[in-house]
Amino acid sequence: MAETNADHSVPKHQRIRQTLAAEIRGLPPHSLLPTERDLAKTHNVSRATIRLALDALRDAGLVYRIQGAGTFVAGPTISKTLSLSSFSEDMEIRGMSPSSRLLAADGIAAGRGLAEELGIAATDPVYRISRVRLADDEPICLETAHIPAVRAPELLDRDLTGSLYEILRGYGLQIIRAEQVVKAVVLDVSEAAMLGTPAGSAALRMHRIGLDQRDRPVESTTSIYRADRYDLRLAVRRGG
Amino acid sequence: MAETNADHSVPKHQRIRQTLAAEIRGLPPHSLLPTERDLAKTHNVSRATIRLALDALRDAGLVYRIQGAGTFVAGPTISKTLSLSSFSEDMEIRGMSPSSRLLAADGIAAGRGLAEELGIAATDPVYRISRVRLADDEPICLETAHIPAVRAPELLDRDLTGSLYEILRGYGLQIIRAEQVVKAVVLDVSEAAMLGTPAGSAALRMHRIGLDQRDRPVESTTSIYRADRYDLRLAVRRGG
DNA sequence: AAGTGGTCTAGACCACAGA
DNA sequence: CTGTGGTCTAGACCACTTT
């Protein structure tokens, strides 16, 4: 069991962060929050703990902070994305119901390209899972995932119509980070047919390598999203 | 003579972060770094200061940390992006030389849509600047920027062939955060002509609203990138 | 059992914004 | 000037990984 989930194991700063996030949702943008020292008193913690919570809220784009002036509620944010999410999570955030149609699932030798991406040998086995992903029963995306077989034995025996990330979590694999490359493409005839769009339509092609807590590659996935039903929303910040 | 430290305004943790980043570049992935307590001793600072540096390196994707085990060098990262960058910076990172061809520059009334995006009145004036952006003298992107006139008086008198972000910095405007929406599109005849590609080619359309330190909108920009010359690379992490 | 990163405290001084 | 967030210290205990 990897899931330790007891109440007393939740850090204070995380609880405070959630409390503050809820309060902030009720405030107009650019409202001034209480000072760090005040918050420390009212929550009975040290200022350092309050800062952990406020810094996390700033990184999430909920507040901005100005030295000498205070901490303020940020303007409304379009994008809940930018934080890594699976297709299933992504659609749920958008208020749609995700599902899958399995096209193919088999085991193959990795080959040179995948081997390099996944840090394994070219002859090592990988599982290949191709699916049409749907939101509210409408096709949104063609997805082909490759997972090293050693990392997820007997993967093909699982129910492959749900969230792949959820299944991988069952193997103790958490995808914590990903490298993603996004391109625009024009759909060919067979792709268009599977997505139910005219050939020659635009689509977003995303290639993703997912990495676990130890920075080991867990998946190499290519997804092709219909441009008319999907856009990518991201909040970007200046890197310090 | 203590010539070594003229850095009055540079925080210690930032200096340590840079020192460590340089050292890490010479190490193979998954190398174990010294413990926080060791680093604190060797840098003559407290452990909290070391943690600020290491946490920043983790957020930058340079190291990963495992409780109970240690801090390790992360695997190589494709993407230097995800941190907000102007077209000019973006191209320089990719090792290409950026330039611009000015298509049009004028002042107009904001209108309803822009007014809402920029937080001004529909009748307020905005500057509109349309450019073809080139990398190594090849057209890459069509870009139209809108900037509230009050924020950058006499903007049209500046040299508009360089980095817009650089010019805005001259007005004391720093774009610290942006909301971005990315879609795939198919180029129409006139767009294709200006980009030197066939009509019907794919392209990435990005719409960006740039915000300053106080979360005030500074620019609303739409860019259309040739798919055959440009892709978007981003590192994504699980949001805590 | 030993050692690691994660959390937390109770102070202190500095840099900066604003009246 | 006062008060804010930014930085920093020197401790402490906890949760976790590894031997």
Image: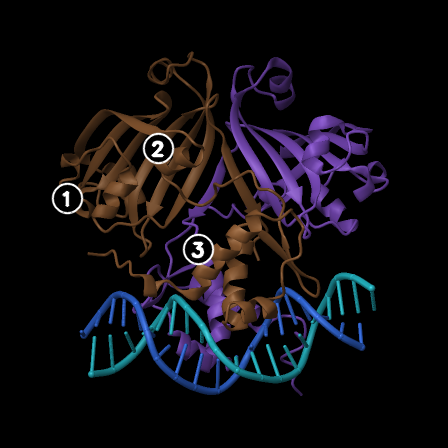
Chain colours: A brown, B purple, C cyan, D blue
Tag 1 residue: A153
Please provide percent x and percent y for residue A127.
20, 36
Give amino acid for label 3. Answer: Gly
Say whether marks 3 and 2 touch (CB < 8 Å): no
Circle on res. A68: none
Q: Amino acid at mark 1?
A: Pro
For label 3, the SS is loop
Tag 2: amino acid: Thr
Residue A222 bears which disc, if any?
2
Compare residues B133 and D14 and report the one nearer the observer: D14
Mark 3 belongs to which subunit?
B
Q: Which disc, if any, is residue B61? A: 3
Q: Secondary structure at mark 2?
A: strand
Q: Is residue B131 above or below residue A63?
A: above
Q: Nearer the viewer, residue A73 or B86?
A: A73
Q: Circle 2: is it few (<14), some (14-19), or many (20+) Cα within 10 Å?
A: many
Q: Residues within 10 Å of mark 3 (few under 14, many from 20)?
A: many
Residue B179: x %, y % from top left: 59, 40
Looking at the rendered image, the quarter that the N terminus of chain A falls into is bottom left
Output the chain of dot 1: A
- Residue A226: percent from the left, percent from the top? 43, 23
